[in-house]
Every structure is written in structure tokens, then in C-alpha cells.
Image (cartoon, helix red, strand yellow):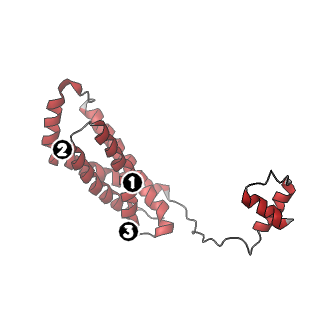
């Protein structure tokens, strides 16, 4: 009976065979036998030090804000001015202090999330620069690269500005998360 119940479940015709839920529970017990259980490797559970995540995240956020500001305000400055003049009255940016506040908030969010990702990845990949750079790369992919695809599709900014921001943010995020991870201790 156990083999036929097991076979019925594997074939997907459990209810068509009219088997009872008792047969299902027997199959589950059979599958839970220690000799049939798949061997799994467990990752050591570690507690994340959220105070250090916050500290490292703030440092990473400040670092990102400075590097990203240098890219946008320095390297891409002329391209932004040309684009802004071309757009004219179609642009409606907030006041400069609001803009800076929003960019700073974004930088802190990216920094904290990046260090949090690093802290979560440490048990699997180990502590160190390789894990920090991997966390930074993943953060860049989901936060900047994915957003850049939208900017390209919508045609909001010229391709030169988008490319410059994408490259600049790549290095800014990697450096920022690396610094924040260096400050993180469990």
C-alpha cells in the first residue's frame, strides 16, 4: 500500500485513485525516514548587529553622497546644464535644499541597505572585501542599473548623462559599501 500510494502521488493522480488522507500521511512518514531525507548543509546562524549596520550604513551613505555629487556636479555638470536649458519649462525640479535632502536620504538608504546586505551575506561568503564588493555589486544592479533601464526606455535624460551616472554610481556604491562593511563588526 505504501508503494502504490507513493506512486499515485508522484504520478499526480492521488485523488483519482480515491486514496485517503491516511495514505498520504503514510507516504509523508516514509519520505521523512532518515535514510530517505536529503542531506542539507546548514549555514551557521548569526545575529546581525543592527547598530553597526546603521553606523556603517551612515558612513557608506556619506561616501556615496560625496562621490555621486562629484560625478554629477563635476564630471557631468556641463551635460546637465545643456540638458536643463534644452528642456526649459518642461522641468519642474524641487527647491535646491529639497533636492539635496532627497539625494542625502537616498544615499543613506543605499548605504544602510548595502551594509545590511553585507551583514546578511557574511555567514555564507565570509567576512571581507570580496563579500563587501559582491554586496555592493548586487545593490548597484537592483538600485541603479535597473533604474537606468527605465530612464533609457522613457527617454528622460540624454544617453551621455545616463551612462556617466551609471558608471559613476557603480564606483560610488562599491567604494561606499566597502567602507561601510569595513566598519561593520558582529
Q: Identify the residue under disc 2.
A: 73
Q: Residue at x 49, y 60 (%)?
A: 120
Q: Viewer-nearest of labels 1 and 2?
A: 1
Q: Identify the residue under disc 1.
A: 139
Does label 2 or label 3 sit earlier along the sequence? 2
Q: Residue at x 73, y 72 (%)?
A: 36
Q: Position of residue 165 (x, y in %)?
A: 24, 48
Residue occupying the far top of the picture = 89
Q: Position of residue 6 (x, y in %)?
A: 78, 63
Judged from the image, the secondary structure of the residue bearing numbered disc 3 is: helix
Please name whichever residue, 151 or 143, is drawn nearer the observer in this view of the structure. Answer: 151
Using the rendered image of the protein, determine whether residue 122 is visible from the camera's viewpoint: yes
Q: Residue at x 31, y 45 (%)?
A: 148
Task: Please tell me whether residue 31 is drawn above or below residue 35 in the rendered image.
Answer: above
Judged from the image, the secondary structure of the residue bearing numbered disc 1 is: helix
Q: Label 2 vs label 3: CA separation?
A: 30 Å
Number of labels in the image equals 3
Q: Residue at x 76, y 58 (%)?
A: 9
Q: Label 1 vs label 2: CA separation?
A: 23 Å
Using the rendered image of the protein, determine whether residue 28 is visible from the camera's viewpoint: no
- Please state if 170 lies on the left or on the right of 83 as rendered: right
Q: Residues within 10 Å of mark 3 (few under 14, many from 20)?
A: few
Does label 3 or label 1 sit earlier along the sequence? 3
Judged from the image, the secondary structure of the residue bearing numbered disc 2 is: helix
Q: Identify the residue under disc 3.
A: 130
Q: Label 3 vs label 1: CA separation?
A: 14 Å
Amino acid at each position: 500500500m505504501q508503494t502504490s500510494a507513493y506512486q499515485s502521488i508522484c504520478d499526480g493522480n492521488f485523488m483519482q485513485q480515491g486514496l485517503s488522507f491516511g495514505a498520504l500521511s503514510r507516504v509523508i512518514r516514509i519520505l521523512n525516514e532518515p535514510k530517505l531525507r536529503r542531506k542539507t548543509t546548514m549555514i551557521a546562524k548569526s545575529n546581525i548587529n543592527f547598530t553597526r549596520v546603521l553606523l556603517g550604513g551612515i558612513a557608506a551613505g556619506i561616501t556615496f553622497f560625496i562621490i555621486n555629487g562629484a560625478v554629477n556636479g563635476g564630471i557631468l555638470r556641463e551635460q546637465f546644464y545643456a540638458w536643463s536649458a534644452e528642456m526649459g519649462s518642461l522641468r519642474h525640479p524641487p527647491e535646491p535644499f529639497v533636492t539635496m535632502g532627497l539625494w542625502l536620504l537616498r544615499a543613506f538608504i543605499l548605504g544602510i541597505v548595502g551594509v545590511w546586505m553585507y551583514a546578511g551575506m557574511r555567514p555564507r561568503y565570509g567576512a571581507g572585501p570580496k563579500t563587501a564588493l559582491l554586496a555592493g555589486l548586487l545593490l548597484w544592479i537592483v538600485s541603479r542599473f535597473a533604474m537606468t533601464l527605465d530612464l533609457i526606455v522613457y527617454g528622460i535624460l540624454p544617453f551621455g548623462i545616463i551612462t556617466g551616472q551609471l558608471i559613476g554610481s557603480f564606483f560610488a556604491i562599491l567604494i561606499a559599501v566597502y567602507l561601510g562593511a569595513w566598519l561593520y563588526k558582529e
